[in-house]
Amino acid sequence: MDKEIIKKIKGIVGRQRVLESFEERLCYSYDGTVQRGIPALVVFPENTQEVAEIVKLANEKEFPIFPRGAGTGLSGGSVPQDRGIALVLTRMNKIKEISKEDLLAVVEPGVITEVFHQAVEKEGLFYPPDPASLKTSTLGGNVAENAGGPRAFKYGVTKDYVLGLEVVTPQGDIMRTGGRTVKNVTGYDLTRLIVGSEGTLGIITEITLRLLPKPQAKQTALAIYDKMENAAQTVTAIICEGIIPATLELMDQTTIHCVENYLNMGLPLDAEAVLLIEVDGSPGQVVEEMKLVKVACEKNGCRQVQVAAEATERDRLWKARRAVSSAIVQLKPTKISEDATVPRSKIPEMVRRLKAISTKYNLYLPVFGHAGDGNLHPNIIADKRDHEEMERVEKAVAELFQAALDLGGTLSGEHGIGLMKKTYLVWETGDVGINYMKAIKNAVDPKGILNPGKMF
Ligand SMILES: Cc1cc2nc3c(=O)[nH]c(=O)nc-3n(C[C@H](O)[C@H](O)[C@H](O)COP(=O)(O)OP(=O)(O)OC[C@H]3O[C@@H](n4cnc5c(N)ncnc54)[C@H](O)[C@@H]3O)c2cc1C
């Protein structure tokens, strides 16, 4: 990168907050995908003004900016394209306000999701979005990807909790969207436009988040199935009982084997599938709902339902679910995590199609995920050094997306498009949809400064 530009950036943020060496830049060249691209510079702003000045400079000198939170993304969204700046927002990590009266919080984008959960729960409040990466991911990254998680089934996803934003526009101006009220229909809904825009339409520098009162009680159960089909049917059966569990997570046999191998916690290796089911609410409601859940499981061919008697047992079950990503890469080193999502009623058919794709292309394809909202996570486990295998992976991914769309679903329930799915975006949006999106991008970012090459 031009020495004059580097000097100016150091003038904005100070030399301590700029990384220049190859080794340091390499650490910001990846995310949770196979994508790689080394930035020319890594910069850590500490306030909105610094972000705005850097973006203005980028417009003047025409270099790209790749916004970055914790780099846990699963679509290549934060990966620099071997040029420009990786703008890392992790130092903007203050929780500025938690208001019990207004049931909201105001935070900077670099706050770690789990740190925020703990802070609001200390006040008797609740912030539901819980991506499985919550120990590492940032709230800014969650907003930019519109992250979901196991609790999305009952509580919705990040967009359902964002009341307002402060955003540095692609031209370096500071804009406020939304506010502190649940109701706000003043003009276009720019908050919703920025949520899920994957760092292409603005840099989020402050977030106002809606909170809920913390549920008083919860109960968690593991339901064990000899047949995957029965597990998939139970998902709809539970809903037909009139219950919306806080979470309803599915793991297939390959996933169960990997987790057991990794944690050695006594999971049933002969089961074709397990469901992890959690209900929450008042103590009485939780007991009643768990009774009905058990009935629905048993009526649908469940071999056994283990209800966690204590918090330690519940934590153990959740540990198994949260270890899935680490556990499945024991099969082979390269994980292609997809999150094609289908209407809930199509889960049994989607699982059947995924198994057929796995057999057809002779690939490991463990299936797990948020069965309650149809957001399965078919992960293809391969070795990127094996070119012949990677060709089969590419074909399998295309078929997997087609299957989701055929069943009335979507390419991505929560990971976004980024680099990984941009070739397929048009399959879902059509030309008119994609051109509308491009027109928005070109109008606000005519020089293509923010996250160029992503999404389209
Ligand atoms: C093990 C594992 C489990 C996961 N589980 C889930 C899950 O259950 N649900 C789910 O939804 N996702 C999940 N993810 C994906 C990922 O964690 C989420 O997308 C998360 O929201 C990314 O946050 P991050 O801080 O790491 O963002 P990054 O990966 O750094 O960035 C993600 C995108 O956001 C943009 N961005 C980041 N910060 C800003 C900002 N301040 N302003 C503008 N743009 C910004 C980047 O440019 C990029 O496009 C998982 C990932 C892993 C590795």
Image: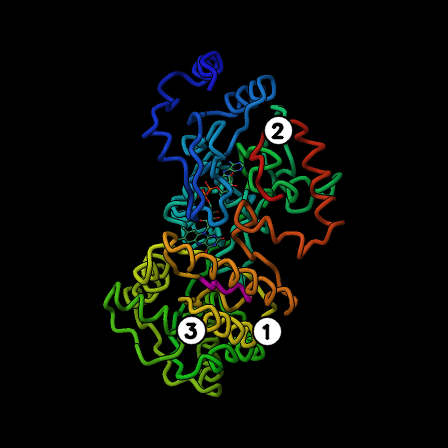
Q: What element carries label 1?
A: helix
Tag 1–tag 3 contact (CB < 8 Å): no
Q: Earlier in the sequence, mark 1 or mark 2?
A: 2
Dot 3 or dot 2, earlier in sequence: 2
Residue 18 on image: x %, y %: 39, 22
Per the image, the residue denoted by label 2 is: 170
Q: In what quadrant of the picture does the C terminus appear?
A: top right
Q: Position of residue 438 (x, y in %)?
A: 70, 40
Q: What element carries label 3?
A: strand
Measured from the top left, where is residue 286 in percent x and y? 45, 71
Q: Within 8 Å: ligand 1 and the Cβ of disc 2?
A: no
Front tag of 1 and 3: 1
Q: Are marks 3 and 2 in contact (CB under 8 Å)?
A: no
Type of amino acid at the residue the image marks with label 3 = Leu
CA–CA distance in space, label 3 to label 2: 44 Å
Amino acid bearing label 1: Lys
Q: Quick one: label 3, few (<14), some, or many (20+) residues within 10 Å?
A: many
Residue named by callout 3: 275
Task: Give the farthest residue toward the left.
Answer: 264
Q: Give the range drawn in magenta.
A: 374-379
- Give how far across and how far down residue 129 sits, in percent: 49, 53
Q: Between marks 1 and 2, how big is the CA–CA gap?
A: 40 Å
Could you say which is closer to the camera, residue 294 or residue 446? 446
Q: Give neighbour class at mark 1: few <14, some 14-19, many 20+ (Cα, 10 Å).
A: some
Number of numbered tags placed on the structure image = 3
Give the residue at x 45% y 44%. 35
| 44 inside magenta stretch | no
Disc number placed over residue 346 in the picture, else none: 1
The residue at 41%/54% (across/down) is 387
